[in-house]
Image: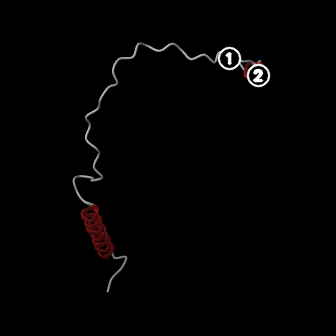
Amino acid sequence: MFDNLRDDAAASYDETPAPRAIEGPAPTFNAKPRSRRILGMTAQQRFILAFMFMIAVCVIGVMALFITGKIGF
């Protein structure tokens, strides 16, 4: 497979373009432009949701540490 790799690379190849099929009218796309919203929320709403999720994870983690006795008063 790799025996004559340099010869193949040095050899010229056919540079003529392949024949194309008969072209009709250009297709038209009526797609709406994509919105930058994820789940229908604005950037500020996503930030508040992520912040609330982070606070919930921290509170659950602290409660788990209290329950297991790793920290205490």
| Residue for badge 1 | 13
**Left or right, 39 with reference to 7:** left
Q: Is residue 27 above or below residue 32?
A: above
Disc 2 residue type?
Ala
Pick the residue in front: 9 or 23. 23
Q: Residue sitting at 73 percent across and 23 percent down?
A: 9
Disc 1 residue type?
Tyr
Pick the residue in front: 43 or 26. 26
Q: Which residue in the rendered view is the most extreme toward the bottom?
A: 73
Q: Residue sitting at 29 percent across and 65 percent down?
A: 47
| Residue for badge 2 | 10
Q: Quadrant of residue 63?
A: bottom left
Colour mapping: secondary structure
Numbered circle sitting on residue 67 = none
Q: Quadrant of residue 2?
A: top right
Pick the residue in front: 71 or 9. 9
Q: Secondary structure at mark 2?
A: helix
Asked if the residue at tag 1 contacts the one at tag 2, i.e. Cβ–Cβ closer than 8 Å, the answer is: no
Q: Position of residue 16 (x, y in %)?
A: 60, 16
Pick the residue in front: 53 or 9. 9
Q: Position of residue 49 (x, y in %)?
A: 25, 64
Q: Which residue in the rendered view is the most extreme toward the front?
A: 25
Q: Residue sitting at 29 percent across and 29 percent down?
A: 28
Q: Which residue in the rendered view is the most extreme toward the left?
A: 40
**Left or right, 19 with reference to 45:** right
Q: Secondary structure at mark 1?
A: loop
